[in-house]
Amino acid sequence: MASSAAAASISMTTLRNLSRNHQSHQTSLLAFSRSFHNLRISSNGPDLSLRSRATTSSTPGFFRTMCSSSETSRPTKIQELNVYEFNEGDRNSPAVLKLGKNPQQLCIGDLVPFTNKLYTGDLQKRVGITAGLCVLIQHVPEKKGSRFEASYSFYFGDYGHISVQGPYLTYVDTFLAITGGSGVFEGAYGQVKLRQLVYPTKLFYTFYLKGVVADLPVELTGKHVEPSKDVKPAAGAQAAKPGATIQNFTD
């Protein structure tokens, strides 16, 4: 019990530090003082331009055919999926792995592994978790925020998972690339819109999924609650009561 209390205390301290850093942003940007100049690459090898005309003309045609075939075989129908992500302070998340020079503030290069809870867009069911890693790459004082590079996954129990990668800006809506999926999300690509509601504990996502052959499960695609800083999950979903979760939800 003492160990759990200590871990929870560390987690909440981390959340407070992230929020304080987001509001103050007194750490200056780290920048390169020099740029690379006069980079030249020379070669004394054979002149590759002397390859036969037949080879150079046939190769582009071959790849055009292959790419065209690949593109036409991928489903292009867009399916929307809305989910809410909440940090409820009970998963010992986030953590901060310090690589920057200032031990008291979040610095460029610091790593932030995290895992939060996921709910359906209508907030009636618990579906799973997020899990991944953010790297702080820029403070933006004029916007009172920060820029992270993020790579993480959304887990939906027996339905599978979706992986994403891209920018996470704490002060504006952003789009990340959908890099793949499993289960009913196998073959997924496209993009997801991240909407910051309360940093860093409450977010809303809209997936624009391509590549998914079958229609998405009905229980995942109900009418979503309009995003606001005041939204919260249904009590049954938050408590993971029977009927208020998807089957074998990821915990």
Image (tube, grey):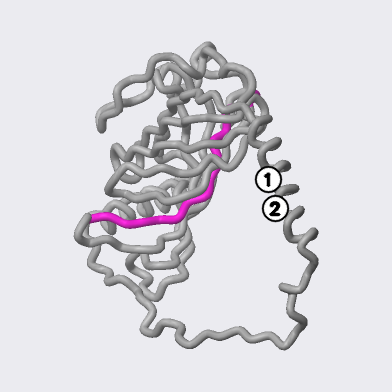
Residue denoted by label 2: 60
- The part of the image, by quadrant, that contains residue 196 is top left
Q: Give the residue displayed 64% in from the left and 36% down from the top.
A: 71
Say which element carries label 2: helix
- Residue 7: image x %, image y %? 47, 50
Q: Secondary structure at mark 1?
A: helix
* In this rendering, position of residue 154 left or right of residue 47: left
**Residue 227 versus residue 215: which sits nearer the camera?**
215
* Residue farthest front in this picture: 53
| Residue under the point 79% across and 60% down | 55
The range drawn in magenta is 144-159
Which corner quadrant of the image does residue 82 belong to?
top left
How far apart are labels 1 and 2 at the CA level?
6 Å
Residue drawn where x is 48% and y is 88% of the image: 38
Q: Is residue 156 magenta?
A: yes
What is the three-letter code of the residue carrying label 2?
Pro
Tell me, yes or no, if residue 234 can be seen here. no
Q: Is residue 137 above or below residue 129?
A: below
Which secondary structure class fits the magenta region best? strand
Picture coordinates of residue 178, whole percent (x, y): 53, 40
Q: Is there any visible trace of residue 215 in the rendered image?
A: yes
Residue 218 position (above or below residue 210): above
The question of residue 133 being in magenta is answered with no
The answer to which of 96 and 73 lies nearer the viewer is 73
Verify CB contact (< 8 Å) between mark 1 and mark 2. Answer: yes
- The residue carrying mark 1 is 64
Q: Position of residue 134 (x, y in %)?
A: 47, 54
Q: Is residue 15 left or right of residue 188?
A: left
Amino acid type of the residue that numbered disc 1 sits on in the rendered structure: Arg
Tell me: 230 left or right of 74. left
Residue 18 lies, in percent from the top left, at: 33, 54
